[in-house]
Amino acid sequence: MNVKCERCGCEDLKYFVQIRGVYQCRRCIQYQGYEGSVLYYDDPVEYEMNYELTDAQKECSKKICELSRNKDVLVHAICGAGKTELVLESIQYAIEHKQKVGIAVARRQVVLQLYERLSKIFNSIKVTRVCEGFTDDCEGHLIICTTHQLFRFHQMFDLLIIDEPDAFPYSSDKTLQGFAKNSVKGHTIYLTATPSDDLLKRVKIKEIEEVRLFRRPHNHDLVIPVCKVIPLYGQFVYLKYWLDKFDESCLIFVPSIKIGNQLSTYLGIPFVYAGYEKLDEFITMFKNNVGSRLICTTVLERGVTFENVQVAVVHTNHPVFNLASLIQISGRVGRSMNYPSGRVLFLCTERKAEVSLCIDLQIQANA
Ligand SMILES: [Zn+2]
């Protein structure tokens, strides 16, 4: 017997139960709520930015806009290249051509940030955020939502932009991926610095187009990480000495809460992780205080931008730091025009393949 869930696309019989003769999917049953909708806009859509795109950005933006009319597009751009700026033209074009547009991101915090930015840029249309805490109004000319909320937009989007499809939890959650697939009737644009093997394979067989941008707007090289091989507790000592050498702010990434707490006690520096109640408060404090230091888990590996930050990773061998997360972590550094360079330190008990690959890819992107 064949069954297929209309919401999440599940075809695995073990998830289905029969209720009054009708098969129901249990894989996505926890996602409940009313359907959202995208409104048409009749006037020309203007967008306003307080800075100009670089020539390279303009060229990519134009290509993406043209290609996405007929095909799915992978926008492969290094961290800090300005991914959002690259799709504004496509959004404008689509809305003006009576198409329904949505942007989906993995994390709620990024939805809220993107909403702040895009409602200023597209100030004549109704931009709507849909995520935990904001689900009362799911109607707008442009929807920005978490991938968790895509179940509300069944066969809705002519253009869906998925920001960082390689980010947790979307990257490993078949239900969320199913929602995304089901919400699109037209084409998808994937924005990422670290495309999955699957996306790259689809590029190779010409199923989707790839547009690359390997240069940041300030045109400086990416910072190449420095790798030191030291036993774990020796890493603490080394880090203390390393931090004494500069006055700029620094994020120190750890693979687990246990190591985070130990290091926090040793260095006397605060430690934050996903679910920590004062997370937002500490992020704001870190942003506002030049020269501050913060220990964190991968919760800060992407999405949040800091003006002038250095990074260190403790126990880089740990499996939680895969290639994508190492690239994202190094990508925190040198993003701003005022501070285009900085320091990236990987501390390992032994040098693993992902560390070498990450360093090689950064060097290649600079070439
Ligand atoms: Zn389902």
Image (cartoon, rainbow, N blue to C red):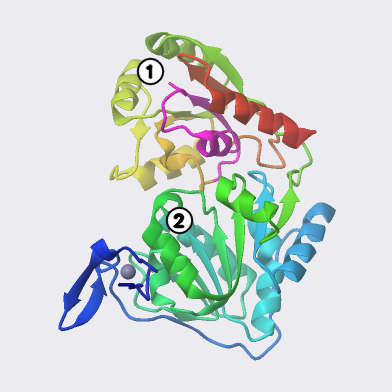
The single residue placed furthest to the bottom in the displayed view is 42
Q: Position of residue 303 (x, y in %)?
A: 51, 49
Q: Secondary structure at mark 2?
A: loop
Q: Position of residue 91 (x, y in %)?
A: 65, 72
Q: Which residues are magenta?
A: 305-331
Q: Secondary structure at mark 1?
A: helix
Is residue 227 one of those drawn in magenta?
no
| Numbered badge on residue 132 | none
The single residue placed furthest to the left in the displayed view is 20
The single residue placed furthest to the right in the displayed view is 55
Count residues near mark 1 (Cα–Cα under 10 Å), then give few for <14, some for 14-19, many for 20+: some
- The disc, 1 or 2, on the residue closer to the chain's N-terminal end is 2
Query: Relative to 279, does residue 226 appear above or below in the rendering?
Result: above
Q: Nearer the viewer, residue 50 or 356?
A: 356
Q: Position of residue 148 (x, y in %)?
A: 38, 63
Question: Residue 2 falls in which quadrant of the image?
Answer: bottom left
Residue at x 60%, y 59% (from the top left corner): 190
Ligand 1 quadrant assignment: bottom left
Q: Nearer the viewer, residue 194 or 142?
A: 194
| Numbered badge on residue 106 | 2
For label 1, the residue is: 267
Residue at x 39%, y 57% (from the top left corner): 174
Q: Nearer the viewer, residue 280 or 183?
A: 183
Q: Position of residue 310 (x, y in %)?
A: 57, 29
Kind of residue at disc 1 = Leu
| Residue 128 visible | no
For the N terminus, give its image quadrant. Answer: bottom left
